[in-house]
Amino acid sequence: MKEKSIITKFFMTQFLIWGVFSLFLSSTPISILNDTKTNEFFNPKFNAVDFSNSTVISDGFGGAYWNDGASYSPAIAVDKSDAMHVVWHDHTDGVWGTDIEIMYASYTNATGWSNVTVISDGQNYIYWNDGNSNNPKIVVDGNDAIHVVWEDFTDSGWGIDYEIMHTQYTSIMGWSLPLVISDGYGGDHWNNGVSAGSSIATGTTAAHVVWYDGTHGVWGMDYEIMYTSISIPEPPCTLTPSGGIPGYDIFILVFGVFGVTYLFIRRKLKKFK
C-alpha cells in the first residue's frame, strides 16, 4: 500500500511539472522559441545599410585649415535638387570678431562641399553682430529658398536679452541681413526675456518658427512657447531671350505667320483681277 502511494505521488509530481512546462510553452511567442541567435546578430559592425566614410566639412576647403575654434550644433536640410545645406555655430575668430557665429556650407554632386561662410554677420562687409549666435536650425522651402534661425545675444534696440534671428538665401539675392523675429513687431520692443531653442518648418506660403521664451506677461513669470511666421519669397522669374515677357516669343510667331498668310492671299487676289 505504501509503495502504491509513492508511485501515485511520483506520477502526480510529474504531471504537475509537465503541466507547468506546457503552460510556459503556450504563453511564449513562437518567434522567441524559434529565434536562432548568430554571431552576426551581436556584431555591431554587421549592418546591411551602406554608408560613406566621414568627412570634415567645417574646415580644410582647398587644403587650407583655418577653422581653429570649436564647431557645434550642426543642422542639415536638402533641397529639391538633392543639394545639402548645413549650418552650425562656430567659435573660430576672424574679421567677424571673437564671438560665436553661425556658419554655413553646401554640397552638390557637381561641385562637392563649398567653402564655409559666416551668415550671422558681415553682410555687405559690415560686421555689427558682436554677441554669441547659437544653435541654428535650417529648412528649405518649396521655392528652394533657405531659411536659418538661431538665438543671438547681440545688443541693440531690442534689449540685452537673447533674441531669435532669421536669415534667408535665394539664388538672386544671396543671404539676407539677419533680422530679429522674436521682438520689435510694429516697432514695439516688449520681449525682454531669454528667447532660445528655436525650431522652424515651412508651409506653402510661410516659414513657421517656435521657441521657448522667458518674457513675463499676463501668462505669468514662467517660460512659455512663442510663435511667429515669415513670408516665403516668390520664386525667381525666368527671363525669356526676347525680353522677359511671358509668351512673347509665341506672340511674335503667331503674328509672323498671320502676316505672311495675309500677304500671300492678297497677292493671289490681285492675279484674279
Image (cartoon, rainbow, N blue to C red):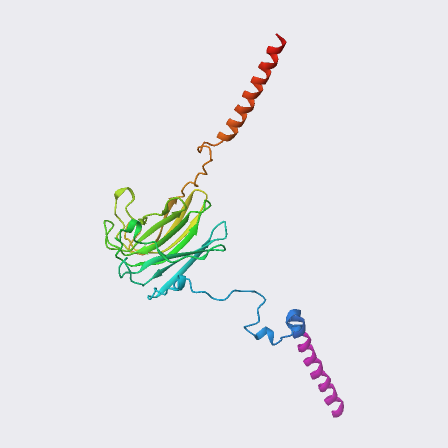
Q: Inspect the magenta stretch and tell me whether residue 15 lies in it.
A: yes
Residue 227 versus residue 19: which sits nearer the camera?
Answer: 227
- Measured from the top left, where is residue 185 in percent x and y? 29, 44
In this picture, residue 78 sits left or right of residue 191: right
Residue 195 in sight: no
Between 217 and 52, the one nearer to me in the picture? 52
Q: Horizontal and vertical percent for residue 244?
A: 44, 34
Residue at the outermost front position: 271
What's the residue at 66%, 73% (across, down)? 33
Q: Residue at x 59, y 14 (%)?
A: 267
Instruction: From the viewer's perspective, tell me whether residue 236 is left or right of residue 157.
Output: right
Q: x and y percent of residue 37 in the render?
A: 62, 75
91 shown above or below 233: below
Q: Residue at x 74, y 88 (%)?
A: 7
Q: Position of residue 85 (x, y in %)?
A: 43, 55
Range of the magenta residues? 1-22
Instruction: Please give left or right for residue 93 compared with residue 173 in the image.
Output: left
How many numbered markers are drawn?
Answer: 0
Q: Nearer the viewer, residue 179 or 120?
A: 120
- Image height check: is 3 above or below 124? below
Image quarter hosting the N terminus: bottom right
Is residue 175 in the magenta section? no
The C terminus appears in which quarter of the rendering?
Answer: top right
Q: Main secondary structure of the magenta part?
A: helix
